[in-house]
Image (spheres, rainbow, N blue to C red):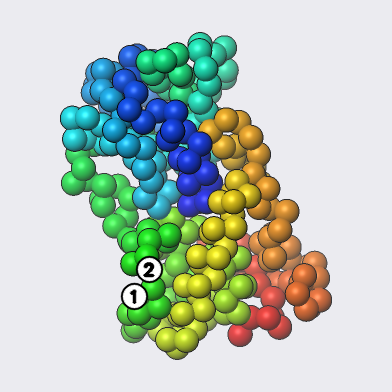
Amino acid sequence: MPELPEIETIRRGIAPEVEGRRIVAVDVRERRLRTPIARDFADRLAGRHVVQFDRHGKFLLGHLDDGRLWLVHLGMSGQLTLADGPVPARTHDHVVVRFEGDRTLTYNDPRRFGRLAVIDAAAVAAEAGGGVDALSPALDAGLLFALTRRRRTSIKALLMDQRRIAGLGNIYVSELLFRAGVRPRRAAGRLSRAECARIVAATAHVLAEAVRLGGSSINDYRDGFGRYGCFQSVHQVYDRAGEACRRCGTTVRGVVVVGRSTFWCPTCQR
């Protein structure tokens, strides 16, 4: 599933091309996504101007001129691609949005796990989980330390909980915990304030680098223009079980934590 760096990369590419533009037509070709697209989705979107194209966690949010929000979640395999002029129809092109100025934004999703909706602004927290965005200045050592208190769950589980911190998933939690020197199965409630500070610093560093490299293209992810990301080429531990740690040479280990494959270096992480 695309995580914060992939969604932010898409946002940065698409935002300058759609902000301030009017949506002139919406073609819904397949409504049967994870949550079915509402019957009035096209009517609520067509004719509106996109005032701002924003992001919270793993969700794209188009602020419309009537005060509502156009919400996009890519699910497991969704792609949002911008092109000039009409584009040839592809298999799994479920929604096509045409903007003034001959711009076309297409939502393609083979597995149909995504979500598209027009919602009231007050409903964002319920949709996105309500956690603080992982790139927000509000996520500091003090906040993370407070979130970990009296928590028996692993630090990996806490960081992936969208009700606490929005935007992080399996790839980037593995990578940032490596940078912070913290094992993913450590009990969150046992972390020190200094360890929380290292995790926050590592989060900012890893996410910024991943956005700079266009995200991680492991399976289906492409950016808003169909291009691959490059961050997977510098993964330190993710999906590298059995390989040598690039820092110390110790064999990277893999285990399942909260139902997800998890990777860490037993020497570099404590």
Residue closest to the eye, 59 or 67: 67
- Residue at 68% over, 60% down: 235
Reply above or below: 215 against 270: above
Alpha-carbon span between mark 1 and mark 2: 6 Å
In the rendered image, the quadrant that contains the C terminus is: bottom right
Q: Amino acid at mark 1?
A: Leu
Q: Is residue 150 left or right of residue 254?
A: left
Reply above or below: 175 against 83: below
Q: Is residue 197 left or right of residue 248?
A: left
- Residue at 51% over, 67% down: 203
**To which residue does mark 2 refer?**
139
> Marks 2 and 1: in contact by CB < 8 Å?
yes
Mark sitting on residue 88: none
Q: Amino acid at mark 2?
A: Leu
Q: Quadrant of residue 142?
A: bottom left
Mark sitting on residue 143: 1
> How far across and how far down the image is residue 47, in percent?
26, 17
